[in-house]
Image (cartoon, rainbow, N blue to C red):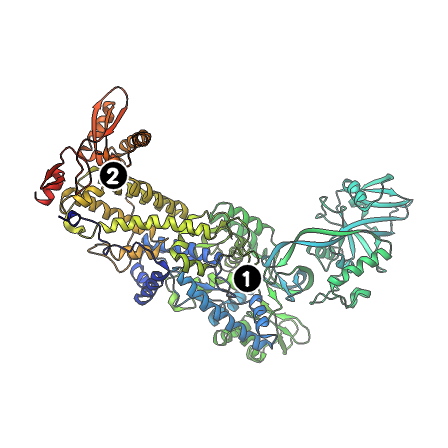
Amino acid sequence: MDLRSTLNLPDPDFTIPMKADLASREPEMQRAWDEMGLYKLIQDVRRGSPKYILHDGPPYTNSPVHIGTAFNKTLKDFVVRYKTIRGFHSPYVPGYDTHGLPIELAVVAKHGRMEPKDMRLACRRHAEEFIDIQTEQFKRFGVLGDWDHPYATMHYKFEAAIVRAFSKLAQKGYIYRDLRPTHWSIKSRTALADTELVYENHTSRAIYVRFPLKDDASNVFAPLAPLYTIIWTTTPWTIPGNLAVAFHPELEYSVFESRGEYFLLYDGLAEKVFEEIGRPIDRKMATLLGSELNGVVFKHPIFDRDSIAVMADYVTTGDGTGVVHTAPGHGHDDFHTGRKYGLPGLCPVDPAGVFTEEAGEFAGKSINDANAFIVERLDEEGHLLKAYDYQHSYPYGERDNSPVIYRTTQQWFLSIDNDDLRARALSEIGRTAWYPPQGETRIAAMVEGRPDWCISRQRIWGVGIPIVYGKESGEPVADPEIMERAAQAVEKGGSSTWFETDISEFIPEGFKHPKTGETEFRKETDVLDVWIDSGLTHYAVLDVKYDPAWGDLEWPADIYLEGSDQHRGWFNSSLTTATALEGAAPYRAVLTHGFVLDEKAEKMSKSKGNVVEPMKAANQYGADVLRYWAASVDYSNDVPCGDNLLKQMGENYRRVRNTLRFLLANLYDFGPSSGHGLAKSLDQWAVEQAQALEANACSEYDEFDFSGAISMVHNFCVKELSGFYLDVIKDRMYCDAKDSPDRRSGQVACYRILQILVRLVAPVLPHTAEEIYARMPMPDRKPTVFLETIEPVGAPLGEDHGVGALLEFRDTLNAQLEPWKADAGVKDTQDVMAKVAGQPELIATLEGFGIDLPTLLKLSWVELSEGSELQIEFSMSPYMKCERSRIRRPDVIEVNGIPLTERDRKVLGW
């Protein structure tokens, strides 16, 4: 007789396949989601529930999605899907950042330079191409969102919203134009804001230079001649712009004699400086406070002009000489000190980094080439004390990866202190929840120390600044009606209309310049910083809602979620514009994550060959495995990623998947509405453990601790389920009568546990959860698992049904059983019986499991007796093995020549 056919074995056709084959099944499921309109369906069902809004920080559309962006988008999807399955209405509108320099550079590299009109069109097409590419990639990663109605900063209505927001900021007094030094990219020929900089290791030519004393009106140094002060700088090219040398008013400066010459510098750095320049200190001649140097005049070391002594609190004593070379056109501090002393903002460098006529003999030379000439001239004049290569951290343009300079130009700024904006922004930071908490300190320090925001760029691809100038006077006009006309034109034809439409279309009839009375004007040709674009997404998308499809969105967002570099970027720009426009932060919470590195914690680069391409990974391992990786790492720090780690995540994923698969496979003949209950205490324990898991995992999800949640699920699947419960219930699930109370009790437990697990893994493993859910025998199954709701009942407070003591005893027993098996040459513990003596409490607990105890301990039989201490004696089982259930029991007898237990005989009707 074929006894196997009499068993209740799991139905492989009922459950999900053993082989996940995610690379082919996931795209099929995604197409099915598209066909059913999954996103819209969820919104329709959840509408009216409490809202939870995650506002998307827009990725830049200049390349396919890299692993860092994939990681970011996946974390966002965890939040949106979790909030959805917790019953919230959580609409998610993805966005794209589409203006700016990198796209210009890419277009020029591909097509060459072209007229501005053609450049803007080519840039728009370039951005559109990568919007399409990135959209398909994000969908491949399983990211759920309103992909039919994303926002993009180049959408005409978005650009119009930027113009209107700029107008509001101008009317509130935040916008002004000024001659100031700003970070300047020579490569891109545009001003840059602090948020557009990165700091790289850089080698500069450092020099010590002496400035001769020219005029000492107070006769401070009368008997000491010749006398010089010494400066140190890493930018020799700024020497032609020098107009002053700065001293700290409260520092002590001393005059030192060296080889018949006298040198003035900060006393505390003298030994170091003289050692550096290779000169002895013969003696100290005099000491005085920096404040006593007011009125002293030095000579420029090359040109025939003065370099006056000025006082400055920013002079430090860490490097250099305590005397600072001051070129008002080439530094923020220098500029303001120059203004204080009435010095001109001399900037003898043009937009291309070439010296102008104001640089005298250096005119026409690029600043990079001129460094050597300047050092040579200083040496010829006898004022070069030392020149050497110096490595240090130096600002580079983030977009064009080239070193920047300070250059004084007319630019547009957003005032950070108008109407107490800085103080109000800091207050809003304190009202925001930060994950991790140190994010608050980081952004607060940046807001406290940031200068006014330079918002103008000398580029082509961006939103034009809607300002006009008097044609003769050059005086700017920020008129609200002109700006509204510009907004209306942009709304119809895009940002290009500002540049390509005749100015008369924007000027109201009879309009006169409010200051000069002029009636003829010219347009501003600069564009807005792209951080204004992205910094106004909250206004255009959440507030204005320029697409009618976004009616479910609300301002402010519940959360912003981006990389930690966005404390100085998007979080900061959004906070600034929102506080200025709305009086509050645009977010209630901010979550930041680290950068994705390789498995050695090194930065990924093509040259190293360590780049993980997310699309390749998704197609090789499956999006759910990639998502499992994203959920498992500690995102609060930089995170590792690579093939070895993804393979490991694949193994962890398979353990979870196989557990879900086994639970489902045992439900092929189960009906949840059949009225069966939990007849066995072990099943009650298992369900209560799952309920405790649900409550604890949700607590982790609520705090955005995805690794904590998925780790709990994985451990529960591996330890409590696969390592114990599912193993010990196989006998009754397979061998009991189909409708036996014990088997049905096990099915009820499997069903309830699966219900919990499939909802818990759904935010992280949406494809796998949907695959399982679609096969679950539910009378009221919804079209998608994401219309289910997690409602944790919490961890049970009472009896653990003796299972805790059982498991502790089982560990003790197994620790003694393993060496006994090795000595006896036994492989299968089902061939072993045990005699156990122990304390009455333990024995009573074990007796409570009755006939199931041998199965729970994976033994043939167990004899129990009370004793003063725990003693376990093993022996080979004397009982026959049941041919049907493969266990040895005292009740096994032969029937028709086949050994069977009493239970198996009843099932067979023998």
Q: Residue at x 69, y 62 (%)?
A: 407
Q: In the rendered image of this protein, does residue 314 appear above or below residue 821?
A: below
Is 208 placed left or right of 652 in the picture? right
Circle 2 SS class = helix
Q: Position of residue 621 (x, y in %)?
A: 40, 56
Mark with earlier residue (1, 2) = 1
Residue type at numbered disc 2: Trp
Foreground pick, 47 / 600: 600
Is 7 placed left or right of 304 in the picture? left
Q: Which residue is mark 1?
A: 531
Q: Position of residue 467 (x, y in %)?
A: 59, 71
Circle 1 SS class = helix
Residue type at numbered disc 1: Trp
Foreground pick, 545 / 262: 262
Q: Position of residue 359 (x, y in %)?
A: 79, 64
Q: Which residue is mark 2?
A: 685
- How crowded pointer 1 is (Cα within 10 Å; few <14, some 14-19, many 20+) is rated as many
Q: Residue furthest left?
A: 910
Residue 108 lies in what quarter of the image? Answer: bottom right
Q: Which quarter of the image is occupied by the C terminus?
A: top left
Foreground pick, 126 / 735: 735
Residue 22 tag number = none
Give the Cα distance between marks 1 and 2.
55 Å
Q: Position of residue 37 (x, y in %)?
A: 32, 66
Q: Give the tally of numbered discs.
A: 2
